[in-house]
Amino acid sequence: MLIGYEERIKAFKNLAKSGNLGQSYLFFGDHGVGKSSFAKSLGYFLEFGDFEIGGRSLVNMRVFRPNEKNVIGIGEAMNVRHFLWETPLGGGRRFAIIDNAETLTPEAQGAMLKIVEEPPTKALLVFVTYDAEALFPPLLSRLTKIYFPRLPRKTVGEILMKDYKVPAEEAERLAAESFGSLGRALDTHYLGQKTAAEPDLTSEIEEEILALRQSNLKKNAPKIGFLLNKLTLLKRYNLNENLARRAIVYEIQKL
């Protein structure tokens, strides 16, 4: 269930029903905020009329991901092209999702640009990434950009309790430490107890700065400055990451 993105669901339903849905989109935002899930649900809606993914198999949608070397190369870009040019089964659209689009090679991005510039009539292409600036400006400028913000702390906690049956006290702790990322909260819940591993705080802060900058640089300037200062301290001194994470979460909520 795509809790927290009801307005986006409504907007895309209206676009589809009115015939105004575009052909090339960029879904961007931090790790674990629901970008890929939303894209897949959109594909399910276009094929079956329901944003809630059920048990039926999709025939007109395909997700393209990085290979074992963590890249999406020119060969896979050609596969995207071939897929989109095939006739949709049962009408509708051919829908390709490029997950982790920041891993596209320069050659692959060039091929994608040609697809975006001259797309098949009944095709939809969605790029999903946490780092929009990893895409070349000519490609980036031709995509309709949809930003996926971090979820409110309260929303993350409610989802953990309702959908994943996490006890209230644990859900509140995970929500507070997740920086608004449901995916990160779930990783900590399911993997943390087994591996005793915490996400690298430096990387978390860098991702948060990037997300804030892409969302609204002027409005988020105080938070960005605060996080940059904390990032400098973390790199300079050997601080306890668990304590630092909790302190940062507490302080940034007051900005």
Image (cartoon, grey):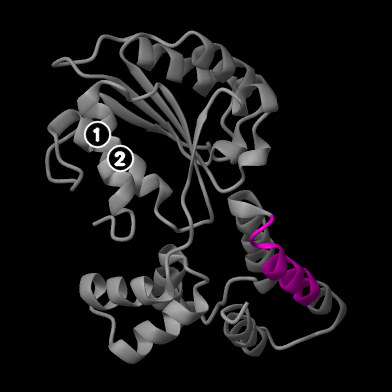
Measuring from the top left, give residue 175's x and y in whole percent: 43, 78
The quadrant the N terminus occupies is: bottom left
Is 215 placed left or right of 178 in the picture? right
Q: For mark 2, what is the residue?
A: 11
Q: Is mark 1 on a helix, strand or loop?
A: helix
Measuring from the top left, give residue 172's x and y in whole percent: 39, 85
Q: For mark 1, what is the residue?
A: 14
Measuring from the top left, give residue 151's x and y in whole percent: 42, 65
Measuring from the top left, give residue 7's x and y in whole percent: 31, 50
Image: magenta residue range: 218-231
Q: Cβ–Cβ below 8 Å for labels 1 and 2? A: yes
Instruction: Identify the amino acid type marked 2.
Output: Ala
Image position of 245 with respect to 17: above or below: below
Instruction: Identify the amino acid type marked 1.
Output: Asn
**Residue furthest right in the image:** 236
Number of residues whose C-alpha sits closer than 10 Å to that of mark 2, classed few (under 14), some (14–19) or many (20 or more)? few
Q: Which residue is drawn at 43% across and 80% down?
A: 174
Q: Residue at x 59, y 20 (%)?
A: 74
